[in-house]
């Protein structure tokens, strides 16, 4: 039997989110895609028929319950919500976006009938970590488990390699350059297109466990 799905993408304007959109556009088994965004995403609706199945809604994530109807009747959610590193020094903003927005969206998706939630956190996520960012990512993982989706897939990538990204400063640019050339076995880094490819692949793969965790090296291996 060939399964087809309808999907929601959260965070489609980010580096991984844009790659997820491309993967979904090129997959005929995804019949409908709803993008829930903080700002519009330019898509080639008029020149590429693959994007006819996409619908965009610009929403206020601070008022998520007002948009609960947009979460109804979708099979899978791809969540790539996250705070850009430029603003990561604001801990309150980071926690709101990377925890509250993710968890609130997950609850609305579950109430709307979604059975599979696929989320990106980070390598080293741990709710007991002394490092704030790792702790927040670990906490959201644990809170998502409590939502009790039929299937929860957690992706923990390392350093994100974004070929087309304009970096915020010289340090970020140098880090990208060094990681891409030194981490040849991809133990600590991965390209954004690889993450997106595997996320979409796994929504069609047989369920292994209620909660599935994909570490950086596993994601890289599955993307080959």
Image: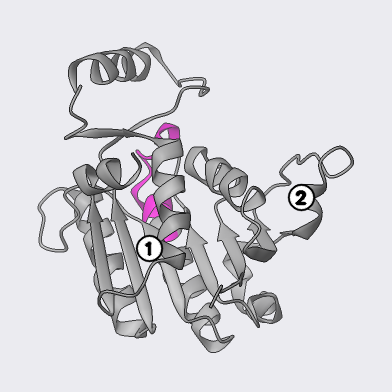
Query: Left or right: 4 with respect to 98?
Result: right
**What residue is at 43 percent from the left and 51 percent from the top?**
93
* Image spot of residue 138 (x, y percent): 22, 61
**What residue is at 37 percent from the left and 11 percent from the top?**
170
Q: CA distance from mark 2 to mark 1?
A: 30 Å
* Image spot of residue 22 (x, y percent): 61, 43
Task: Report helix, strand or loop for mark 1.
Answer: helix
Q: Earlier in the sequence, mark 2 or mark 1?
A: 2
State which region is magenta: 85-96
Q: How is the image coloured?
A: one colour
Which residue is label 2 attached to? 51
Residue 62, above or below 106: above
Q: Looking at the picture, tell me which residue is in the foreground, 93 or 68.
A: 68
**What residue is at 56 percent from the left and 77 percent from the top?**
75
Is 216 contained in the magenta span? no
Q: Badge 1: few (under 14), some or many (20 or more) residues near its Cα, within 10 Å? A: many
Residue 194, above or below 33: above
**What residue is at 47 percent from the left and 59 percent from the top?**
79
The count of marks equals 2
Q: Quadrant of residue 98?
A: bottom left
Query: Left or right: 31 with respect to 169?
Result: right
Residue 89, above or below 53: above
Which dot marks residue 99? 1
Disc nearest the viewer among 2 and 1: 2
Q: Looking at the picture, tell me which residue is in the foreground, 53 or 4.
A: 4
Q: Most extreme residue toward the front, as rendered?
A: 1
Tell whether label 1 touches label 2 (CB within 8 Å): no
């Amino acid at each position: 039997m060939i399964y087809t799905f309808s999907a929601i993408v959260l965070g489609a304007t980010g580096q991984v989110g844009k790659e997820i959109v491309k993967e979904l556009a090129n997959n005929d088994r995804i019949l409908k895609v709803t993008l829930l965004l903080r700002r519009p995403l330019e898509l080639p609706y008029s020149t590429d028929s693959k994007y006819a199945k996409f619908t965009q809604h610009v929403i206020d994530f601070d008022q998520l319950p007002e948009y609960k109807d947009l979460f109804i009747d979708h099979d899978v959610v791809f969540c790539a919500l996250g705070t850009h590193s430029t603003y990561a020094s604001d801990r309150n903003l980071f926690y709101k976006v990377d925890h509250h927005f993710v968890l609130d969206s997950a609850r609305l998706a579950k109430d709307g009938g979604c059975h599979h939630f696929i989320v990106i956190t980070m390598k080293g996520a741990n709710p007991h970590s002394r490092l704030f960012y790792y702790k927040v990512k670990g906490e959201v993982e644990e809170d998502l488990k409590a939502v009790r989706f039929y299937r929860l897939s957690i992706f923990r990538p390392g350093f994100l390699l974004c070929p087309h990204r304009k970096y915020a400063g010289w340090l970020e640019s140098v880090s990208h350059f060094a990681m891409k050339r030194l981490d040849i076995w991809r133990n600590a880094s991965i390209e954004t297109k690889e993450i997106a490819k595997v996320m979409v692949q796994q929504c069609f793969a047989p369920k292994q466990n209620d909660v599935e965790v994909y570490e950086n090296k596993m994601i890289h291996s599955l993307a080959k």
